[in-house]
């Protein structure tokens, strides 16, 4: 399965992005299951393409989350949404406050998303938005604005089964 990664292929609306996110998450679960099955079957020749496909899909999901964060951040906050702490949130259906916050955080740290995603490919891991979000949150406590370059870049995602720690420099 080849994933075509292009910003032009992503919807421009929150509703469209939420739909793509839901479908993409289920596809990613299925792709991870396929990767585990290939590993359990010992099909070494099929493992590399399966891992690459899973990483491509995970990167596409990161693109969706970043785009969603950009669109959410660009929307004006109506009074109702501004008081979401009172339970009157006007986020679109399928987008929780947690998803909204995480997406906007990722959108504000595209450099970290790209860096962690590249590191995940090197180490045979799968870059996951929740893990990248945690890396950003850990690194955001620094007072140095240039500290983003020194943030820990452990993707913390799923490593392909059977990959040894020695192969990944650990």
Image (spheres, helix red, strand yellow):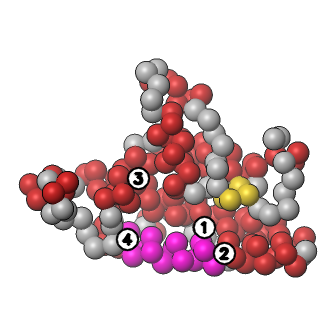
Residue drawn at x 69%, y 76% as measured from the top left: 33
Residue on which the image places disc 3:
102
> Dot 3: what SS?
helix
* Mark sitting earlier along the chain (1/2): 2
The magenta segment is 17-31
Q: Residue at the top extreme? A: 144
Q: Are marks 2 and 4 in contact (CB under 8 Å)?
A: no
Residue behind mark 1: 57
Residue at mark 4: 18
Q: CA distance from mark 3 to mark 4?
A: 13 Å
Residue at image x 51%, y 55%? 130
- Mark 2 highlights which residue? 31
Label 4 Cα crowd, 10 Å radius (few <14 / some 14-19 / many 20+)? many
Image x and y of residue 144, in percent: 46, 20
Res 107 seen here: no
Density class for disc 1 (Cα within 10 Å; few <14, some 14-19, many ≥20) is: many
Asked whether, in this view, residue 44 is left or right of residue 68, the answer is right
Q: Secondary structure at mark 1?
A: helix
């Amino acid at each position: 399965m080849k994933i075509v990664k292009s910003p032009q292929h992503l919807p421009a609306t929150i509703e469209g992005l939420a739909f793509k996110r839901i479908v993409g998450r289920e596809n990613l679960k299925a792709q991870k299951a396929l990767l585990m099955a290939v590993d359990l079957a010992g099909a070494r020749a099929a493992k590399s393409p399966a891992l690459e496909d899973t990483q491509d899909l995970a990167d596409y999901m990161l693109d969706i989350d970043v785009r969603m964060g950009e669109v959410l951040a660009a929307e004006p906050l109506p009074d109702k949404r501004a008081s979401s702490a009172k339970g009157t949130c006007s986020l679109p259906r399928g987008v929780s406050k947690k998803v909204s916050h995480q997406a906007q955080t990722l959108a504000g740290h595209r450099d970290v998303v790209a860096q962690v995603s590249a590191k995940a490919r090197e180490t045979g891991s799968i870059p996951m938005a929740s893990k990248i979000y945690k890396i950003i949150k850990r690194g955001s406590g620094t007072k140095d604005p240039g500290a983003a370059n020194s943030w820990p870049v452990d993707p913390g995602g799923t490593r392909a089964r059977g990959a040894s720690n020695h192969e990944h420099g650990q």
